[in-house]
Image (tube, rainbow, N blue to C red):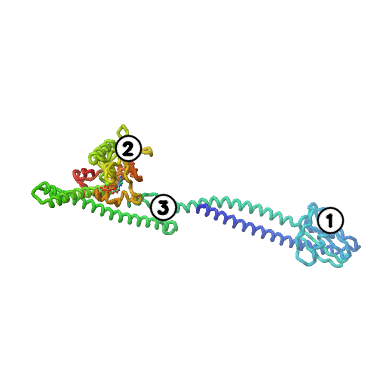
Amino acid sequence: MTLRRRLVLSIVALVVAVSAVIGAGSIIALASIQTGTIDGQLQKATSRASTKFGQGDPNGQRPNDDALQPLGQAAGTLTAYYVAGGGAGGIVLNDDGSRSFLSSAQLDRLGDVKVGVDPATMDLQGSLGRYRVAAVQVDNAGVGNAVLVVGLPMSPVYESVRSLLLVVILVVAAALVAASVVAAVVVRRSLRPLERVAETASTVARMPLERSDALQDVRVPDTDPRTEVGRVGSAFNRMLGHIAGAMQARERSEQKVRQFVADASHELRTPLASVRGYAELTRRMGGDLPKDVVYAMGRIESESIRMTSMVEDLLLLARLDEGREIQFDDVDLTGLVFDAVNDAHAASPEHPIEVDVPDSPVVVVGDAARLHQVIVNLVTNARTHTPDGTRITVGLAPSDSGSGVDLTVRDTGQGIDPEFLPKLFERFARADSSRSRSAGSTGLGLAIVDAVVQAHGGSVDVTSEPGDTVFTVHLPAEQPADAAAAATASPASPESTDAPAADTWSDVPNRT
Ligand SMILES: Nc1ncnc2c1ncn2[C@@H]1O[C@H](COP(=O)(O)OP(=O)(O)OP(=O)(O)O)[C@@H](O)[C@H]1O
Ligand SMILES: [Mg+2]
């Protein structure tokens, strides 16, 4: 049950309970006050009747009606007498002034009333109903010693109680309706600030908290420290501030690391180019040098080539991490596939490669050079991490999801160790096989594939079992929204200190 409903129900229940208690108290009080009044009237009626009856009938005859109902008795008053010798009788004064005799059953009942006790209520049945009755001893009346019982009807008390009960029921019903409406409005209004806090919290929960400025505009408006919700709101805002601060610190440190890697890779290119150049120069003069030195120079040259490629990969990854380096344009993926497959075929003719693409060109929005690199890296993996003769199939097809394109690179090699699969796209991740080491791999190829594809707003999946390994690159047909926004908001600034010079960066060699 929601807090709001619980509060409304509690308030309504409380109001109804209080009204019911007050109503019940009023009814009980009214009944007892009215009964007290009747008792007072009964005392007076008894004294009138006993005085008149006491005067007796000098003839010792049956007491006449006037003796039983003296002047001043109210309508409904009943009087019964019980003479010591055995005679008994009684009458009741009707509303119209006439008198009726009491039945013998009624006289029997009234005969039980004791002299000298407080008035009691008695049900006399028939048309009389409930009566308040009291008995008095009258000595030396003309008819001898007698007990006189006088009664007054209780119906006025019951009528008042019934009327009050009706009023109480109406008042409780009205209180129920009014309390429900007022409680619903008041509770809704009181809980609105809490709902705003909850809304802000769920907004934050839905946010992808990758960038610290994501939280910049998220604040709870209710921060009045005098209210409970205000205190929650201001604590929540402080917490958001702390989170944003922690994220900024993390971003700064990540930025520093990226910057360092980018700078270090950039700086390493020139000395590496010199090492490679001098090694090549020395090799060309091979005839004049001892064989060992020629061999050592060859190794220096090949390792420097490898190191250059590694440095280029690191630089590319650092740039992709910064969200740069991708230049969106219409790209014909079919052409890129054919280029990569032809290069691969030339590099290792012992791997049969098939191409499975639609007849019409498949065009996506992306960076041609980087997408070429993605295809080359995947095809190179299929070549270098599988035995000779392994069949490779490169396919292009419209995506199953309906929008975008799926590029698949499939091979019939030995497959990838399932334990290694979750780490496959991590940097420097290589399955621990001597073959991949000897092939001079660094474990950056798939990390680059992943980073490039993500920068295009796409995704890479892999399924692998012995004899069937499939890498599927899904590329959306559209440019990703954040890249488009970044492109319109801030055109690349050429002054930026770590921006690569156009000629040095855009021509990072593809890894073949
Ligand atoms: N088609 C494949 N068949 C079997 N193993 C594969 C395949 N593709 C990748 N791998 C495994 O995944 C590892 C990581 O691949 P990745 O391309 O990232 O690095 P690499 O090929 O080892 O080095 P680099 O591509 O940087 O030269 C490889 O070392 C290899 O063990
Ligand atoms: Mg590779």
Report if the CB atoms under discs 3 and 1 are less than 8 Å apart.
Answer: no
Q: Which residue bears the numbered disc 3?
A: 201
The span from disc 3 to disc 1 (Cα, nearest Å) is: 83 Å
The span from disc 2 to disc 3 (Cα, nearest Å) is: 43 Å
* Residue in view at x 30 percent, y 38 percent: 365
Judging from the image, what secondary structure is the residue with disc 2 in? Answer: strand
* Residue in view at x 50 percent, y 52 percent: 2
Comparing 53 with 490, the one in front is 490
Numbered disc total: 3
Query: Does residue 290 appear left or right of residue 67 in this picture?
Result: left
Comparing 494 with 38, the one in front is 494
First in residue order: circle 2 vs circle 3: 3
Disc 3 residue crowd, few under 14, some 14–19, many 20+, Cα 10 Å: some
Q: Which residue bears the numbered disc 1?
A: 103
Disc 1 residue crowd, few under 14, some 14–19, many 20+, Cα 10 Å: some
Return the x and y of residue 339 as percentages of the image width and height: 25, 37
Q: Which residue bears the numbered disc 2?
A: 396
Return the x and y of residue 335 as percentages of the image width and height: 27, 36
* Residue in view at x 51 percent, y 50 percent: 185
The span from disc 2 to disc 1 (Cα, nearest Å) is: 113 Å
Which quarter of the picture shows residue 65? Answer: bottom right
* Residue in view at x 32 percent, y 49 percent: 424
First in residue order: circle 3 vs circle 1: 1
Comparing 270 with 202, the one in front is 270
